[in-house]
């Protein structure tokens, strides 16, 4: 009988993906203007955002650290914008360590 090849184990630091929890608060929503405004915080950074959901345009300010959050925030908003309500607090995972 042939034996099965050994299972290779990855080191613990390679097995875990880096992750940071981002906290989002919706401040204002306008269906007339097709706009969602809010703030998001992660890893000691804080940003304000405007999501023009009719054209898929996301504006994030200030620019400091924007590259860390913009793609993950965009994906979260595309997936969840219809579920978000003004005054609501939400969280999502960013696959990066801040």
Image: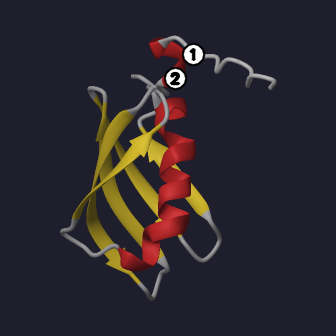
Counting from the top left corner in percent of width and height, residue 79 is at: 52, 67
Query: Callout 1: few (<14), some (14-19), or many (20+) C-alpha neighbours within 10 Å?
Result: few
Q: Residue furthest front?
A: 1
> Which label was assigned to residue 63?
none
Figure check: 58 above or below 53: above
Mark 1 highlights which residue?
10
Residue picked out by circle 2: 15
Extreme residue toward the right, this view: 2
Q: Is residue 25 left or right of residue 7?
A: left
| Disc 2 packing (10 Å; few <14; some 14–19; many ≥20) | few
Label 2 with label 1: CB-CB less than 8 Å: yes
The residue lying at 57 percent from left, 16 percent from top is 10
Please name which of the two marks, 2 or 1, marks the residue nearer to the observer.
1
Image quadrant of residue 43? top left
Compared with 42, 34 (above or below) is below
For the N terminus, the image quarter is top right
- Estimate the x, y position of residue 60 in percent, counting from the top left: 47, 46
Name the element at disc 1: loop
- Label 2 and label 1: CA atoms lie apart by 6 Å
């Amino acid at each position: 009988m042939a034996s099965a090849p050994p299972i290779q184990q990855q080191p613990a630091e390679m097995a875990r993906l880096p992750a940071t929890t981002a906290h989002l608060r919706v401040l204002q929503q306008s269906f007339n203007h097709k706009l969602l405004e809010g703030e998001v915080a992660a890893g000691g950074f804080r940003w304000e955002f405007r999501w023009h959901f009719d054209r898929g345009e996301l504006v994030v300010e200030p620019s400091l650290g924007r590259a860390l959050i913009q793609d993950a925030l965009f994906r979260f908003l595309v997936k969840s914008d219809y579920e978000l309500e003004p005054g609501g607090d939400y969280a999502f995972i960013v696959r990066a360590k801040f």
